[in-house]
Structures are given as C-alpha cells and as structure tokens.
Image (spheres, rainbow, N blue to C red):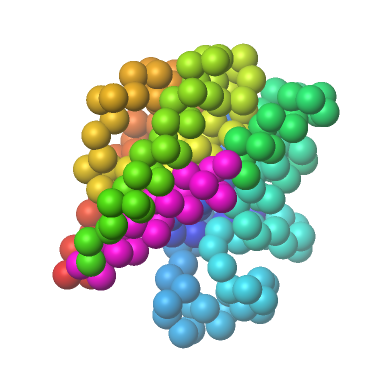
C-alpha cells in the first residue's frame, strides 16, 4: 500500500497510527504538495492533489477519515476501531465530524495566523477553548472519545490535540483530556518513536518557514 503524506500534518498522522494499530505496513511516500513536480504526480492519482492519499492495489482513497475507516473495514480483524453497531458508529462519526468541523478547524485557522506572524483574535482563542472544553466533556463522560474502548475517533482526535503543542497551548485546565492522551497513546504500537519523528519533522518545517 502506497501512502502519500507529510508527517507534519495531523490528518496524515492519523492513518499511519491506525495502520500501526492494525499491524499494516504502509509504503510511505513523503510528499510536498507545494512542489510542482510532486503535485503533478499526485494529481494523476488524486485530482484534488491532497494528502493523505492511499493507493491499495490500484484503489485510490483520499481524505484522512475515508482512509482510516477504509483501512479498518478492509483489514481490521474485527470492528472494534470502527464499530458496526449503528448507535456506537454514529457517536464515532459525530466525534470525527466534531474534529474536522470544530476542533481542528479552529486550531488550523490559528496556526495559519501564527505562521503569518499575525495575532489570533480573542474570539478565535475563545472558540478554540470551547472546542477543547467539549473534548474534555466527551472524555469525562467515558474513558474514550466515542465508546468504552479505543476507536478511530480517538486516533484522529489525538493528532489534532497533539498539534496544540504548536501553539504551546496549556492543557493543565483539562485533566481528563490529559489522561485520555495517556490512555490512547499507550494503546498505539511504537507511539513514542512515532511522536519523536513527528516532532522532528514539525521542528524542521517551522525552521524552514522562518
């Protein structure tokens, strides 16, 4: 399976972590979508030329949530990570939509401003706080974000939450989120090494933008 990605991107990280959990080895193809040659090559597979993009025996999937749910449906030994029970799956899906439409949306808007050396507004920071407050509520109700066990919702949200480090965001007021991070990362094989590689990639990315 070829996987076109950038380790800097939280959505790209999600499928790598799901693959680790499933015991799948991805053929990692680091891709810079801002490079015209690499972008043109990717466009032949994915007309949106976005990452992550997965190619599995000629079957092309892009968008991170589409990829992670495909991997579980196609290669999971069971449906634990993406339960088939409609009620449980609806909560998993809601948390995924909450991530992309609320938490990650607020975070990435602020990160883009910081990269442009612009100051986020108080309103933007308050929206981000409210989003983290919601996650705190979710993981107070139960040990994991969507069920009583690890699901793809936890893994995708993990990438977003760890990206808060880019802003040096203080998670001290969110004890349940901090405990949830420890629970989730403890269940992902070789997570410490993965995080180290991701942090190094992010450090280099930020340095190159200065």
Q: Measured from the top left, where is residue 40 in percent x and y? A: 56, 83
User: Height in image: 117 above or below 121?
Assistant: below
* Residue pictured at 47% horizontal, 73% vertical: 33
User: In this orientation, which residue lies closer to the viewer: 100 or 151?
Assistant: 100
Quadrant placement of the C terminus: bottom left
Q: Measured from the top left, where is residue 48 in percent x and y? A: 63, 73
Quadrant in the picture for residue 62 = bottom right
Q: Is residue 202 left or right of residue 80?
A: left
User: Height in image: 174 above or below 119?
Assistant: above
- Can I make out residue 205 in this image? no
* Residue pictured at 74% horizontal, 32% vertical: 90
Instruction: Report the span colored magenta.
Output: 98-117
> Looking at the magenta stretch, what is its main secondary structure?
helix
Q: Tell whether position 12 is magenta.
A: no
Q: Is residue 16 left or right of residue 58?
A: left
User: In this orientation, which residue lies closer to the viewer: 160 or 200?
Assistant: 160
Quadrant in the picture for residue 114 = bottom left
Q: Residue furthest front?
A: 123
Q: Tell whether position 101 is magenta.
A: yes
* Residue pictured at 48% horizontal, 53% vertical: 105
- Can I make out residue 40 in this image? yes
């Amino acid at each position: 399976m070829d996987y076109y990605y950038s380790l800097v991107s939280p959505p790209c990280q999600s499928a790598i972590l799901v693959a680790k959990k499933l015991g799948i080895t991805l053929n990692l193809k680091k891709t810079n979508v801002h490079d015209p040659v690499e972008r043109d090559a990717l466009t032949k597979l994915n007309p949106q030329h976005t990452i992550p993009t997965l190619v599995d025996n000629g079957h092309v999937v892009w968008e991170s949530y589409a990829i992670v749910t495909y991997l579980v449906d196609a290669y999971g030994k069971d449906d634990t990570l993406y339960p088939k029970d409609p009620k449980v799956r609806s909560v998993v899906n809601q948390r995924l939509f909450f991530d992309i439409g609320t938490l990650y949306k607020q975070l990435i808007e602020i990160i883009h401003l910081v990269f442009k050396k612009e100051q986020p507004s108080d309103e933007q920071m308050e929206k981000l706080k409210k989003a983290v407050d919601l996650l705190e509520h979710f993981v107070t109700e139960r040990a994991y974000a969507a069920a009583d066990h690890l699901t793809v919702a936890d893994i995708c949200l993990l990438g977003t939450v760890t990206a808060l480090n880019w802003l040096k965001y203080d998670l001290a007021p969110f004890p349940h989120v901090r405990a949830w991070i420890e629970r989730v990362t403890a269940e992902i094989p070789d997570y410490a090494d993965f995080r180290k590689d991701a942090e190094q990639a992010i450090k280099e990315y930020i340095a190159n933008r200065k």
